[in-house]
Amino acid sequence: MNTFKMNIRLAIAILSIGLLGGGAVSAQETLTLKDALEYALSNSEVLSKARLEIEGGRHKVAEVRASALPQIDATSTLTNNLLVQQFVLPAEAFGGTPGEFIAIKAGQTWNAMSQVQVNQQIFNQQVFTGLKAAKSSEEFYRLSAQLAEENLIQQVATNYYQVIITRQQMSVIDANIERVSQLEKMIGSQFELGLAKKIDLDRVKVNKSNLIAQREQLEYAVVQQENLLKYYMGMPVNQQIVIPDTEADKLESEAISLFDGSTIDVEKLLDFQLLKKQEDLLGLQKKAYQAEFYPSLSIGGNYVYNTQSDKLNVYSSKALNFDMSAVTLTLKIPIFDGNARRSKVRQATVELKKVHEDLRSTSNALTMAYENARIQIKNSLNTIESQRTNKEFAEEVFNSTQNNYQNGLASLTDLLTAETDLVAAQNSYNEALLNYKVAQIELVKSNGQIKSLINE
């Protein structure tokens, strides 16, 4: 999808979110994961900066390439000799009295000079190595931008599902507040008829108050998580968003295994490729230092046009005009610099050894992340099944205890305990779904397929 179509689609999805009514939203305005990711890829400040780095890399290549092209300069000067310099010479040389001296002007009042210089590198190993390094830098910035995209997708997706789960927890609390409210109403009626104790009514009220407090905490958590989501997306924090309920339904239906037991090719992952490119750059840096030991050869030429006059009529036929030109071949041979070049080469060698260690460490870390994500997927799937069963049992226990309480066969303590266990089981199930989704995102990130989330 090109940028224009993507922006149009997103504009339709969120156009009226706060644009006309101070941020008011309607039930129809939704933000799917796909919308959130596409918006982030188009508006993230981090990606904008990474793309500017790519553009800067292209300009850097052009700058270095320019040093291998002819360098042409033109200069022109105009001088007014307020006091013309004079030479003292023997008067006898000009027919004067022997032993006497005369002062003769050494120039004119006005002097102008125009000059064109051309210089071309014939052999300069530093320039050629620098050009290769500049091209590698451009590729480095491109890989960095791609890695920034992958990291952004992971951040947005993870936070997106965190918002969904927290909202699901709010739904659980809302359902339990409704049940406790009904219980409070029933016990209140019984208390008025003398069939229930005041302490029982107070216990229910306390339980309801605790649930309301929990809901308020979840409301604050949702606002904070949504703000963080919008921050990652590059969306104004005061922009209102609505996540559709269908996204929560997907979590449960998607809880399936996503791997076939295969391994990953670490060298295809951007984290590893970025370090390899860094290794290339350090290698070129070392070669650039080594190139300082090489002689350099350049050719240059200049043309000078000089004119002098006692009046401001330079460059005219009345002035004294003359020109000159020269071609110069320059060979520069480095001999001794106090071993500064050798020290720079050795420093570059140390940096290369360090990046080699980073490559080993990164390769191991990427493999570990992939294997850990696979293990977490398996564990999350088992936990989901276990928590789903626990949730169903907790619902059955609560319904049975509620029925027994209404028939006088269970105490209020049993009912409140069953209600608490039901809330815990429902929240544990939702947490298991979130852990699964986080592990899934980590898995597709670790095998280089994080961008597949955009097409979900």
Image (cartoon, rainbow, N blue to C red):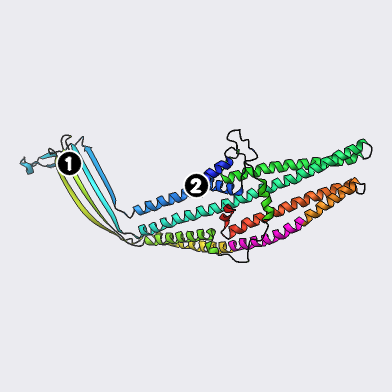
Q: Nearer the viewer, residue 225 or 114?
A: 225
Residue 418 belongs to magenta span: no
Image location (x, y in percent) of residue 439: 65, 57
Q: Is residue 340 left or right of residue 40?
A: left
Image location (x, y in percent) of residue 367: 59, 63
- When the figure is inspected, residue 64 is found, relative to residue 319, above or below; the finding is below
Q: Which residues are magenta?
A: 365-388
Q: Which residue is mark 1?
A: 307
The prevailing secondary structure element of the residues shown in magenta is helix
Q: Nearer the viewer, residue 305 or 194?
A: 194
Q: Which residue is mark 2?
A: 3
Residue positioned most to the front: 28
Residue 368 belongs to magenta span: yes
Residue positioned most to the top: 21
Image location (x, y in percent) of residue 308: 16, 40
Disc 2 secondary structure class: helix
